[in-house]
Image: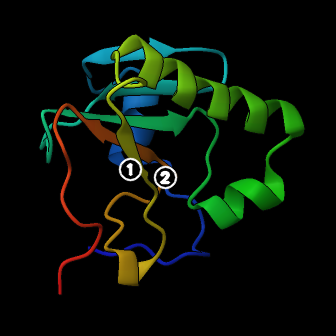
Amino acid sequence: MSVQNHQPYDNQNIFAKMLRGEIPCKKVYENDYALAFHDINPQAPVHVLVLPKAPYVSMADFSAKASEEEIAGFFRAVGATADKLSLCEPGYRLIINAGPDSRQEVPHLHVHIMGGKKLGAMLVD
């Protein structure tokens, strides 16, 4: 399933259900604006997702509609999560997928924080 970049928000997506407490997650960090948890299908030794608590489909949606407070709180959560995971010194990668070409699967904006080893090339042909 791919996500269209400008589709309406689906409040029945798995992340919306996690935010409502209907589906459990292995929480790493939380503030008023974001929730961070371990990915259920990790692609690196450390693979955590950080998502805003408000209903945004993509970065374009978020940057157009979120308040300055939401934007700051969300990105502070990304930084705090990387710090809590002790990834700052060795380094880590942030990935945000948006739309069908990126293979975004869940229609809720989320940042992948990946690390715990030297990561390979960004794209493989």
Please identify the quarter of the rendering in which residue 46 is found.
top left
Mark positioned earlier in the residue sequence (2 or 1): 1
Please identify the quarter of the rendering in which residue 117 is found.
top left
Residue located at (65% from left, 32% from top): 74
Q: Quickly name the residue at label 1.
A: 13
Residue 86 versus residue 55 in the image, above or below: above
Give the Cα separation between the discs numbered 2 and 1: 8 Å
SS at mark 2? loop
Name the residue type under label 2: His
Q: Nearer the viewer, residue 32 or 116?
A: 116
Residue located at (18% from left, 78% from top): 124
Q: Residue 1 at what x, y percent from top left? A: 26, 73
Q: Quickly name the residue at label 2.
A: 108
Residue 27 versus residue 105 in the image, above or below: above
Residue 115 visible: yes
Residue 20 visible: no
In the picture, measured across the screen, residue 45 lies left or right of residue 105, that is: left
